[in-house]
């Protein structure tokens, strides 16, 4: 009987240990604002600004790459959120020498931070594309040289779990802290709505679209003053 109880106890310990590991892996981190002058978490606006070229492909093997020289976001925030959202606004876009545009049409990125890779500094996670009532579709468009005749149109479908998103807390001795978001995703779901394989670099529905780019996210309180923003 003693031996059986010992075995049962070990099994129970193993189950509890596995449950603890699962809970830790499922832990979600938050984006937190902090006004160091008064020690308060404040509501305000999260503003993002691209710091390099934003690049899109309909599939990972596509020969057509759509690039945008700039991206900005601006969203109201409580100052403490596990899954902040942002509608991106892309500028300076082109593809294979042709003018292009990326239009979310009200759809937003929803960010998840799930794993800490460097204590207090680096995190990884995923992004969703969410389109509320009346929003969407989120589309890429490539035009002929005249800038008006449509050459290719691609929908970025509402989806969850866009991979390879890195979040990095950055510090500066003279400025409030902010967060860099780095994307190197290769599982974006897309659908070609118009255009030939030659024009778009793909056809039909795909699940290996790519997105890469880096954006700095800063927090501004109700007075318009930049304050600390950190993943924690």
Image: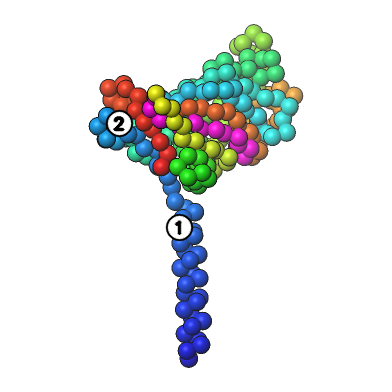
Residue 44 or residue 144, whichever sits in front: 44
Using the rendered view, name the quadrant where residue 44 is placed: top left
Picture coordinates of residue 48, whole percent (x, y): 45, 25
**Mark 1 residue element:** helix
Spatial distance from mark 1 to mark 2, Cα to Cα?
A: 31 Å
- Asked whether the viewer can see residue 60, the reply is yes
Q: How is the image coloured?
A: rainbow
Which residue: 38% across, 27% down? 176
Picture coordinates of residue 16, whole percent (x, y): 46, 68
Picture coordinates of residue 42, whole percent (x, y): 29, 33
Q: Which residue is mark 2?
A: 35
Could you tell whether 40 is left or right of 45 in the image?
Answer: left
Which residue: 48% across, 66% down? 17
**Mark 2 residue element:** loop
Vertical relation: 18 (above or below) 92:
below
Using the rendered view, name the quadrant where residue 101 is placed: top right
Could you tell whether 115 is left or right of 185 in the image?
Answer: left
Q: Which residue is mark 1?
A: 23
Task: Give the overall secondary structure of the magenta segment.
Answer: strand
Residue 137 or residue 212, whichever sits in front: 212
């Amino acid at each position: 009987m003693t031996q059986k109880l010992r075995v049962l106890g070990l099994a129970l310990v193993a189950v509890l240990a596995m449950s603890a590991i699962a809970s830790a892996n499922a832990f979600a981190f938050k984006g937190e604002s902090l006004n160091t002058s008064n020690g308060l978490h404040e509501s305000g606006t999260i503003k993002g600004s691209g710091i390099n070229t934003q690049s899109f492909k309909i599939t990972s093997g596509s020969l057509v790459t759509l690039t945008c020289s700039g991206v900005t976001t601006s969203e109201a925030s409580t100052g403490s959120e596990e899954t902040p959202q942002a509608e991106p606004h892309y500028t300076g876009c082109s593809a294979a020498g042709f003018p292009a545009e990326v239009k979310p049409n009200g759809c937003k990125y929803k960010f998840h931070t799930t794993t800490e890779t460097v204590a207090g500094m680096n995190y990884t996670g995923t992004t969703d594309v969410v389109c509320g009532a009346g929003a969407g579709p989120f589309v890429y468009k490539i035009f002929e040289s005249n800038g008006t005749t449509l050459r290719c149109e691609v929908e970025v479908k509402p989806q969850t779990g866009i991979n390879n998103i890195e979040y990095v807390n950055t510090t500066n001795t003279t400025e409030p802290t902010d967060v860099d978001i780095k994307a190197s995703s290769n599982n974006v779901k897309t659908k070609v709505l118009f255009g030939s394989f030659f024009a778009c670099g793909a056809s039909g529905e795909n699940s290996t679209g790519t997105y890469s780019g880096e954006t700095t996210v800063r927090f501004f309180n109700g007075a318009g003053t930049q304050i600390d923003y950190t993943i924690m």
